[in-house]
Image (tube, helix red, strand yellow):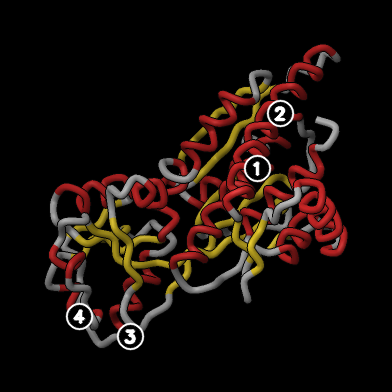
Amino acid sequence: MLHSRLLRYLDMVARTGSIRRAAERLNISASSINRQLLALEDELGTPVFERLPKTLRLTAAGEILIEHIRETLKEHSKTQDRIEMLRGNHGGTAHIFATDGLANGVLLPMLADIRDNHPSISTRLTVATADIVLQKLVSGEADIAVAQGLPHHPSINVTARFNSRIGAVFSSDHAVAHRPPKRLADYVDHGIVFPDAPHPFHHLIADMFTRAGLDFRPRHSSSSVCNLKEMARHHGAIAVLPRIDVIEDLRRRALVFAPLPAIVLQAEISLARQERGTTNSATNILEIELRNALRDVESEENETGPKRSMSVEH
């Protein structure tokens, strides 16, 4: 517990693959992290990271160490909760609003971790459109929100923004999984499905086909990302969705994601809370865990696709 700061430094370096990026996110100097890392490696008598030209990669010893670090950080959180309870602060409840794809994807394991590792707090999740999410933030009903296409409003504080590539999603046994199309037009013949008009990315995706010179209407559209994923998973459709909406399916290898040929479309995800208002430890913990979950997705997407960044705002 007393060395939790160093453990978090090492965890962030492992997540980002970079001392500089870890320092930016932790708001400390890169030299401070590097100095402590070198001291630790000297104490262990073995490197924790392999220094590659553009990244840092965990060594075998580093893999063992980072597993221990993450388990220790989880126990640290539990200990903090117990101490807070002794002080009479029981953590409270955090009400989170989220758009559909995020609520049923990247948020699921994060909320499960909070349930397991923070026994003094409780969470409440409401799924809504981006416009409704904004309304609930402004009215104070939402303690925190994570949403795609969140409109701007002066009374909310967007604490982080994240971009995820939009691409084709299909089952692993689909024909295109074995012979990826080289043209956008080739996908159309396989039965494209994508979010309907209320979704913030409907027009973005539709315009993409128009710019490609394709007179195109989806075979099926839906306000439910879960519905579109099921169409792709079990009914041979190709869904056009942000990668973050299917991240848990990709981790389980239930679906495949492929960038669209010669086109780069990005979905913006915002992490936000009220500009002013009361907060409790539950809200603060939830924001930290949400930020970490988005950064995990960022790391995965950086490893498998084009580079893009997440910006943290104050």
Mark 1: few/some/many CA within 10 Å (<14, 14-19, 20+): some
Q: Tell me which corner region of the image, top left, top right, bottom left or bottom right, holds residue 262.
A: bottom left
**Which residue is labeled 4 in the image?**
185
- Separation of marks 2 and 1 at Cα, in angstroms: 18 Å
**Residue 170, how many percent across, how many down?**
24, 58
Amino acid type, callout 3? Arg
Residue 148 against residue 224 in the figure, above or below: below
Front-lying residue, 302 or 101:
302
- Separation of marks 3 and 1 at Cα, in angstroms: 50 Å
Kindly tell me whether residue 139 is visible in this rendering.
no
Q: Earlier in the sequence, mark 3 or mark 4?
A: 4
Amino acid type, callout 2? Ser
Q: Earlier in the sequence, mark 2 or mark 1?
A: 1
Kindly tell me whether residue 44 is visible in this rendering.
yes
- Separation of marks 1 and 4 at Cα, in angstroms: 48 Å
- Separation of marks 4 and 2 at Cα, in angstroms: 50 Å
Secondary element at tag 3? helix
Disc 3 + disc 1, Cβ < 8 Å: no
**Which residue is labeled 3 in the image?**
211
Q: Is residue 75 left or right of residue 111?
A: right
Secondary element at tag 2? helix
Residue 63 against residue 257 in the figure, above or below: above
Q: Earlier in the sequence, mark 3 or mark 2?
A: 2
Secondary element at tag 1? helix
Q: Nearer the viewer, mark 2 or mark 1?
A: 1
Secondary element at tag 4? helix
Q: Is residue 201 left or right of residue 41?
A: left
Mark 2: few/some/many CA within 10 Å (<14, 14-19, 20+): some
Q: Tell me which corner region of the image, top left, top right, bottom left or bottom right, holds residue 95.
A: top right
**Which residue is labeled 2 in the image?**
77
